[in-house]
């Protein structure tokens, strides 16, 4: 009995040691909000403004892609309409009449954050952008995102389009249970073609961690002038798994995320 208790104590100590990160250094960072979670032990290692309602920018597209993936039929062709092309950059460059596979549009949405791809997904899957946004909000409510409201599938700034770091963490924890989502979220590039005109499209990631940090496995970047630099990042090494949510970062988000990962994965 004593041996068992001693073993349990050692296990508790080892877990708590694994969870140690330099909170004083993180407190000095000029970021609007920051969450760091050890996905292996399920411990929240650091939290700054977890419940603050902020603009999520293109982190929104995690929900857009997730709904499209879950409804299935990813090989279905989608004919691009004029409405689907009425977006602000970043864009894939679709033209009315192009026929694009739904899975290619999901990849364009996640990898390059193309807004025409996200809007095309919304209209194709939801029947209209408004109905798709209703699906986004229903899904958010279903998975416990109680302080989130979406008004568009792209992440455009809007007073009624907001989320919290804690809600975005919930969304990501749900999303990474999906094999297809994980496969797409760690891709750093994708080349694809329209099905009818053989036009070539190329999606390349804005996520510098995927290009420069060997343990990075996703998830999504975001930026608008009002939301600032945003990032949901995940890294895995030797059975350790860490998830970061960063919003309105005035710091170098790539350097910051890498430093956090190094502390968590190598502790």
Image (cartoon, grey):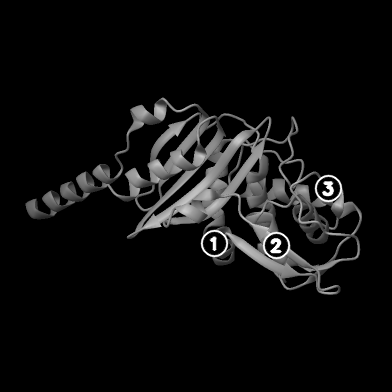
Q: Which mark is residue 80?
A: none
| Residue behind mark 1 | 182
Q: Quadrant of the N terminus?
A: bottom left
Q: Percent position (x, y) of residue 191?
A: 68, 67
| Residue behind mark 3 | 130
Q: Residue at x 75, y 53 (%)?
A: 118
Asked if the residues shown at circle 1 and circle 3 are in contact, with their CB atoms under 8 angstroms apart, the answer is no
Q: Secondary structure at mark 1?
A: helix
Q: Percent position (x, y) of residue 262?
A: 35, 46
Q: Secondary structure at mark 3?
A: helix
Q: To which quarter of the image does residue 197 belong?
A: bottom right
Q: Residue at x 73, y 46 (%)?
A: 154
Q: Which is nearer the eye, 235 or 72?
A: 235
Query: Of callouts 1 and 3, which one flags the residue occurring earlier in the amino acid sequence?
Result: 3
Q: For label 2, count other residues whose C-alpha is less than 10 Å away and answer few (under 14), some (14-19) or many (20+).
A: some
Q: For label 3, count other residues whose C-alpha is less than 10 Å away and answer few (under 14), some (14-19) or many (20+).
A: some
Q: Residue at x 39, y 41 (%)?
A: 260
Residue 43 visible to an observer of this rendering = no
Q: Is residue 117 above or below residue 27?
A: below
Classify residue 100 as left or right of residue 15: right
Q: Percent position (x, y) of residue 235?
A: 43, 53
Asked if the residues shown at circle 3 and circle 2 are in contact, with their CB atoms under 8 angstroms apart, the answer is no
Q: Percent position (x, y) of residue 133?
A: 77, 47
Q: Which is nearer the eye, 154 or 1?
A: 154
Measured in 3D between alpha carbons, the distance from the residue under mark 2 to the one under mark 1, in whole angstroms, is 20 Å
Q: Which mark is residue 202?
A: 2
Measured in 3D between alpha carbons, the distance from the residue under mark 3 to the one under mark 2, in whole angstroms, is 28 Å
Task: Please tell me whether mark 2 or mark 1 is closer to you in this view.
Answer: 2
Task: Please tell me whether mark 1 or mark 3 is closer to you in this view.
Answer: 1
């Amino acid at each position: 009995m004593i041996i068992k208790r001693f073993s349990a104590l050692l296990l508790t100590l080892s877990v708590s040691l694994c969870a140690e990160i330099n909170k004083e250094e993180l407190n000095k960072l000029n970021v609007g909000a920051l969450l760091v979670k050890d996905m292996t032990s399920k411990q929240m290692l650091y939290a700054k403004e977890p419940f603050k309602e902020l603009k999520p920018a293109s982190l929104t597209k995690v929900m857009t892609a997730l709904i499209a993936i879950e409804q299935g039929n990813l090989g279905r062709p989608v004919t691009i309409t004029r409405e689907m092309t009425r977006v602000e950059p970043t864009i894939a460059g679709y033209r009315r009449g192009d026929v694009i596979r739904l899975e290619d549009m999901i990849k364009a949405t996640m990898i390059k954050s193309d807004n025409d791809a996200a809007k095309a997904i919304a209209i194709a899957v939801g029947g209209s952008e408004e109905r798709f946004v209703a699906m986004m909000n229903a899904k958010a409510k279903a998975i416990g995102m109680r302080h989130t409201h979406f008004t568009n599938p792209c992440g455009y700034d809007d007073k009624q389009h907001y989320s919290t770091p804690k809600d975005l963490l919930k969304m990501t924890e749900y999303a990474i249970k999906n094999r297809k989502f994980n496969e797409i979220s760690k891709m750093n590039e994708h080349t694809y073609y329209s099905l009818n005109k053989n036009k070539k499209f190329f999606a390349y990631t804005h996520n510098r961690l995927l290009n420069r940090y060997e343990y990075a496995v996703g998830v999504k970047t975001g930026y608008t002038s009002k939301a600032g630099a945003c990032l949901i990042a995940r890294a895995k090494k030797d059975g350790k798994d860490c998830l970061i949510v960063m919003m309105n970062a005035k710091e170098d988000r790539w350097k910051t995320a890498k430093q956090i990962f190094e502390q968590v994965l190598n502790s």
